[in-house]
């Protein structure tokens, strides 16, 4: 059994407690002792490795509760739905999983995946066939024919990209059971979706309460939790009433929705990283100003409501939406913590707790992961700096010095460069080339897509 003593480090245990100077003793897959007890149990033993963490922070590895490992950073749903191939997507996902580890991520929840391939990738990592973080995963997201966040790209029936359209109770129950049979750790429902040209605008609830209950009741009878993508008060209310285990986004709640969430203490994962990146950095990549403002407002309009939920005891979990071109793998897994500090007013230690101890819920491993404590699995990050003072330290990859998963030191050496397979990306001709543009009589016009068409 491998034994390692990490000493002289600043320990952030993931519970929200202040950092403390103490040793951490790992035996096999688990943490077995802390502080003076760790030093005493290691003393005089010749089979104990020692890691000197002087000047560094020892903390639980980051858990990303919303990481689309199979997507490979598409720039559009068209690219994701129509330019991916099964085996190549799996190979790319295995490569990208290594990026996560190098960013200090030791566990992820992949809510849905193209070709259901994250189920196989999870099993391949567990079997030692490839390296990556611990993975818990859904299968296909469940849609009704009204749609999801891909609007009219979603068919009236069948599979498209990462989702499956279901209709009627019998089909809903059958697909839920099939996903569980295939090995899904979670069932995901797109409770709201974009309905182009809908008079109310924004995302619309596309499931009835009875349909949601059919999924939740079926999954719960088989011991599997359910998560729901929700924007809007009506969707949150129905998710709580249906017995949903985790609510994603939960923006634009009203007082009644908030009251229900607080009463049931349903965990909420805002997943604001995508919006924050577009709002803060979108201009650098040519994103439309109106779109940037729309996403900025989703954060600013809802931060106070989500903070009220947190203060009332509702668990807030961290998810990065990594896997899109605006949230590439390995770069933004810390970002949700920054948003929690900046916009929700959490302290860095509270934000870290949301990404570690609290996020063990997303991994279905409460009491097993996310803490530096005896008996917990030794998923540990050693970082040069003090994230309890400056959370942005966790986004500086050169500061990630050591990562352990189940007590095993992970390879942090640079990955070999890669290219995209042929046909992997959508071809972009560029902006509209009118005669007047070609002859210098007008500037290029970047048309804005109306909000209800996004």
Image (cartoon, helix red, strand yellow):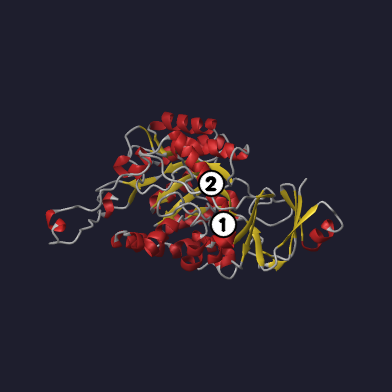
Q: Residue at (50%, 33%) from the top-left corner? A: 179
Whole-percent x, y for residue 235 in the image = 40, 48
Please name the residue that numbered disc 2 is placed on.
97
The reply to whether residue 302 is visible in this rendering is: yes
Q: Quadrant of the N terminus?
A: top right
- Horizontal side of residue 340 vs 349, given as left or right: left
| Most distant residue in the bottom direction | 389
Residue 139 lies, in percent from the top left, at 48, 37
Above or below, 356 relative to 390: above
In the picture provided, is 323 more to the left or to the right than 79? Answer: right
| Element carrying mark 2 | helix
Is the C-beta separation of discs 1 and 2 under 8 Å?
Answer: no
Can residue 184 be spotted in the picture?
no
Which quadrant of the view contains residue 402? Answer: bottom right
Q: Residue furthest front?
A: 416
Mark 1 crowdedness (10 Å alpha carbons): few <14, some 14-19, many ≥20: many
- Give the left or right position of residue 422, taking residue 119 as reference: left
The disc placed on residue 355 is 1
Q: Nearer the viewer, mark 1 or mark 2?
A: 2
**Mark 2 neighbour density, 10 Å: few (under 14) some (14–19) many (20 or more):** many
Image location (x, y in percent) of residue 310:
53, 61
Q: Earlier in the sequence, mark 1 or mark 2?
A: 2
Helix, strand or loop at label 1? It is helix
Q: Which mark is residue 71?
A: none
Q: Quadrant of residue 209?
A: top left
Query: Is 286 left, or right, of 306 in this rendering?
Result: left
Residue 439: x, y in percent?
13, 58
């Amino acid at each position: 059994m491998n034994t390692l003593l990490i000493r002289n480090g600043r320990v952030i245990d993931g519970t929200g407690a202040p950092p403390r100077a103490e040793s951490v003793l790992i035996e096999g897959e688990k943490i077995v002792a802390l502080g003076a007890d760790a030093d005493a149990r290691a003393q005089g033993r010749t089979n104990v490795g020692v890691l000197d963490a002087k000047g560094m922070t020892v903390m639980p590895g980051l858990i990303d509760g919303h990481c689309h490992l199979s997507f490979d950073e598409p720039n559009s749903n068209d690219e994701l739905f129509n330019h991916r191939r099964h085996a190549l997507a799996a190979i790319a996902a295995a490569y990208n999983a290594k990026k996560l580890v190098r960013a200090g991520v030791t566990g992820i929840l992949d809510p849905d995946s193209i070709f259901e391939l994250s189920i196989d990738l999870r099993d391949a990592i567990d079997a030692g066939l490839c390296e990556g973080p611990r993975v818990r995963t859904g299968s296909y997201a469940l849609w009704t024919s009204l749609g999801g966040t891909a609007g009219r790209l979603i068919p009236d029936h069948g599979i498209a990209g990462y989702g499956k359209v279901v209709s009627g109770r019998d089909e809903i129950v059958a697909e839920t059971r099939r996903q569980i049979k295939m090995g899904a750790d979670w069932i995901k429902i797109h409770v709201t979706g974009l309905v182009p040209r809908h008079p109310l605008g924004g995302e619309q609830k596309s499931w009835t309460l009875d349909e949601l209950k059919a999924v939740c009741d079926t999954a719960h009878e088989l011991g599997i939790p359910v998560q729901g993508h929700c924007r809007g008060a009506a969707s949150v209310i129905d998710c709580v009433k249906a017995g949903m285990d985790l609510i994603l986004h939960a923006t634009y709640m009203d007082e009644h929705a908030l009251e229900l969430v607080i009463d049931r203490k349903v965990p909420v994962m805002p997943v604001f990283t995508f919006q924050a990146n577009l709002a803060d950095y979108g201009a650098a990549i040519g994103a439309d100003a109106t779109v940037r403002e729309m996403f900025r407002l989703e954060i600013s309009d809802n931060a106070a409501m989500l903070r009220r939920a947190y203060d009332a005891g509702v668990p807030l979990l961290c998810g990065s939406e990594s896997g899109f071109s605006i949230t590439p793998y390995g770069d933004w897994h810390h970002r949700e913590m920054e948003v929690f500090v900046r916009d929700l007013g959490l302290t860095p230690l509270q934000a870290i707790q949301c990404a570690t101890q609290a996020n063990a819920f997303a991994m279905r491993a409460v009491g097993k992961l996310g803490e530096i404590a005896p008996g917990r699995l030794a998923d540990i990050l050693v970082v040069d700096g003090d994230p309890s003072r400056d959370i942005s330290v966790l986004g500086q990859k050169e500061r990630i010095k050591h990562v352990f998963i189940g007590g095993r030191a992970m390879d942090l050496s640079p990955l070999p460069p890669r290219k995209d397979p042929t046909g992997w990306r959508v071809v972009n001709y560029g902006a509209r080339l009118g005669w007047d543009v070609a002859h210098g009589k007008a500037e290029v016009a970047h048309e804005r897509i109306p909000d209800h068409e996004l």
